[in-house]
Each structure stands twice: as structure tokens, then as C-alpha cells.
Image (cartoon, rainbow, N blue to C red):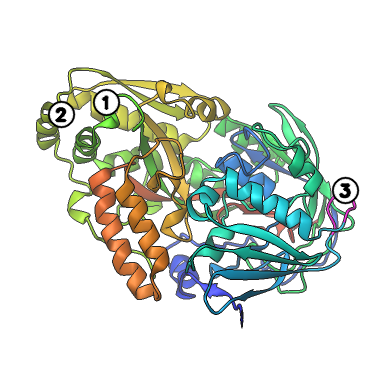
Amino acid sequence: MKKWMPLSLISAGLLVACNNDNSSDVTESTDASSTNNAIAEELRVGYPAQPESLDPYITTAVATRDITRHFYEALVTINDDFEVVPMLAESIEESDDGKTITFHLRQGVLFHNGKEMIAEDVVASMERWKETTTQGRSNLEHSTFVEVDDYTVELQLDESSSIILHVLAEVVQIAAIMPKEIVDEADGTGVNEYVGTGPFEFVDWQTDQHIHMQRFEDYVPSEEEASGLSGHKEALIENLYFEFVTDSSTRIAGLQTGEYDVIITVPLDNADQLEAQPDVELVTALGSLQTGIFNEEEGVFTDPLMRQAVNTAIDNQAIMLGAYVSEEFFTLDAGIMFEDQVDWHSQAGEEHYFQNDPDRALEMLDEAGYDGEEVVILVARDYDSLYNTAVVLHQQLEELGMNAVLEVTDWPTYLELSEDPSNFDIAITSFSTRLIPHQYPTLSKRAAYVGWTKSEELDRLLDEIKEQPTQEEAFEVFEELQVQFYEDMPMLNIGKSSGLTGVRSNVQNYEDLIGPILWNTTIED
């Protein structure tokens, strides 16, 4: 048995490199070391979309991720350097054969309902997470979580895996630990109560208005130093509101007047306007991979040649300029992992990226037998960059001679429609930074994710990566996978973006790591 130490996914140079190119992973509006522990009465976030659910097990929506991280916690999470570190676990041990991982739980951690977290809660939560989420279905299919005693849980694997702790540190569908009785009552629509162990506790959800959280008075923080999503957390705000404001001009006006203390997703063509305002600061957030997911379940894109034709035709630069205004806010890159992810980034398959060759694409459409069938591009209006991506893509496909139709909805409707393959052919979305390639749900047939990829070869390569004894050998297999990605084309790799968050200058210690971090944040009088 060996004592587990944090596993570095991305080099410590990532933070420095991103700071230099104006796209930092964690950007602070003030020095995070200078908190005075004063409790502010309230903080209001102007947020562009309403989540479909606050159960992170049943949705990959960014809104759910950004909100629920404040009241849910997991066994492990990531720090500033993208290392996997314990959170609700105190320590972790791995057996010599790698098939048993033992989690020793922190004692005295309380749920928001006053109950102490023990092993039965962890087992119930993780078994449901394993069965419900894309990551669980793809990577933990033949594993079992077992209660050893009240403060010890074992994860028993059918085979060793070099990535399993990174899987459990999933940021989007957080492996949230909830009380067993709430997990047991959950159905297909999710849990009926939102009870976690985080520094804030859920109060209410006023549909189309806001989600209200309050400071959890009995929160038991980690003794480790605060870093990223890990370590010491403290709610320095009595009441935290996520206000749903889909109109970007309304969010901007609210930030300027002080109605909102923070606004998420500043339209990039408004950046200069806000930078000129002395009581507002702009925070550059870690970016996303801009994509269109192909529907492989039914319709014209069941044929991989049709998917390849669209990839061959599109002008990636024009689409990204339409979405992000300036090259300052995006990069064009054949790699599906980010450039600063030195352990994973590759240009394998680059000959298939940014071809901008409509003549060749027309030949491919003809070869595939395309006969003017309707191509529905589904997008939500709530996120300006996604909407503008869809508008330019729609224009390019029309110019190619395809019968493209733009279907524009709000975000909750988008999420509902995208679950039914009869509703769309291309779904426009973005994926925030993934720790490992396995966390792109579109790559795995087993994930049964929107788009419903059919590639058994991608699954085989994902499995082979997990089996490699060293990162160098895993990377070699990953390069094969990236070439296969361009062959199967489950989604478009359009480009990679960075985003802007607006913060009032009296907001202290605001951070961003794949979404806002509002613990350890307060408001100066």
C-alpha cells in the first residue's frame, strides 16, 4: 500500500504562461492573501443563463457547474496548478496493484442539514455518480465503492487506471457528496433537496429570477492552504445571489451602477467601455474549446463523410472572429487539449484542421449523396459567443449550398432539445478546460452524451491511454486518438477562447478557475 500524493496533470508553468498571454487560469482582482475576514451582507452575480437543474450528476451545463460548486464538495478536487488533491478525503492510499484506492475521510464534516458526513453517504453518492454521469459510465463501469468503516471508503477497480483520480476530480459534473437519504430518494429528474458540505448552503430558487445561497455557519474548512478549488474555504458573504440576466447590455448596466457586484461573460466588444470605468475591473477567465456537436444518432451526419465535409469547408478564423471580436481572445489550434497542457497538447492530425476548402467539401457532399436535406443548427441565445458562432457557421454552410436552418432558444430549452436527436443536426456549445482527454464526453460511445458518437475505436484508444504505465506512453496513444478524432469527427474543433468577467473594484479576492470562485471573496465597505 502506498500513500497517495497529489498527481500533477499540467506543469506548474501553466499559470505563468497563461498570465503572460493574458489568459490566466486563476486571476484575482486583489491580493488573495490580504483577507480581513469581514462578513459582507450580500454579493450579487449577474449570470447569463439559468441552469436546468442543481443536481450536477444529471447535467453538464456550465450554469450548474458555476453555481453548485459553492454548496457541494467532492472527495478530491484540483488546485491552482491543476494537481489533484484531497478535499473531503483527508488522505488517499493506493494498493500496489493499483486496483484498490482507499479514501480516509475527514472527520467532523457537516452537511447543511446538520448531519455528519460518513462513509455511507460517500458510498451512496459515488455509486449514483458512477451510474449517472458521463465520466462514471465511461471510466468506472466495473468498479465498486465499499464502506470499510464510518470514515474509510474503498474504490475497488477491475483493473488499474492511471487517470482514475483525475476522473474523480471532475469539475463540470462534480462528484458531489450528499446525504445518503437524499441520494436514495433521487429519481431520473435528480435529487429533491440540495444539501452538501460546502461553505454556502442553498436557500431558494426563484425561477427566471435568481438562486439564493447563504453562509453555512457550521462549515468545517480544510486546514490546507486555499488553492484553486481546494484547501481552506470561508464564506465571507452572508447572502450570495446568482441573478439570471440573459441580456448582456442589462448585465453591463447593472455592473456599472452597482446593482451587480460581478457579471459573468462580458461581451468582448464592450471590454474597452468597461476598462475605462475606474470602479470596474475585468478578469480574464480560462477559456473553452468552441465546438459544434454532430448528431450521429439520426439525420445526415450519421455518415462520417458528411461530418468531415463540414470540417473541411469551414473558415475557423472567420467563425472565431465573429464570436470573439479580436484575435486577442482566441487561438486556432489543431489540438483538442489546450496548448499549455504540456502533458497532452499535440498537433497530430493538423492537416485536417482549418482547411477552409469549400471546393473539396462540395466533392465530399456529392460523394456522400447529400441532396438538400435540412441541417438544423441548435444554439442558445443566452451566451453571445455561442450564438455568434452559430450565425457565422450557418452563413458558411448556406454559402456551401447546404440547407442550413438556425434554431435559437434559451439555455434551458437548448439543453432539453439537445437530449432528443430528432431536434437538431449540429448543437453549438463549448467545453471548458478538461484535465484529461477522457473528460470530453463526445469522445466516448459509452458516455451516451449528446451527439451519441458511435466510434468504438475512440473508446478503445481511451482505454489504452488509461492502461499506460507512464505519461510519455499515454501521450503516444493520445496522439493516435487525436488523429482518429479527425477521422470520426464527433464534433468540430473550431478554436479555443478566453472569456471576460466584470468585477466591481470593491470586491476583494475574487478568483476564477474554470468558473467563478466566491468563497474567500468579500466586499470592501
- The amino acid on which the numbered mark 2 sits, given as a three-letter code, is Ala
Residue 404 left/right relative to 498: left
Q: Which mark is residue 7?
A: none
Q: Which residues are magenta?
A: 110-115
The image shows residue 360 at horizontal and vertical percentages of 10, 37
Residue at image coords 32%, 44%: 455
The image shows residue 124 at horizontal and vertical percentages of 72, 51
Q: Which residue is mark 2?
A: 368
Callout 3: helix, strand or loop? loop
Of 234 and 466, the residue lying toward us: 466
Q: Which residue is mark 3?
A: 113
The image shows residue 212 at horizontal and vertical percentages of 78, 39
Asked whether 279 falls inside the magenta stretch, the response is no
In space, the residues marked 1 and 2 are separated at their CA atoms by: 9 Å
Q: Which residue is mark 1?
A: 300
Callout 2: helix, strand or loop? helix
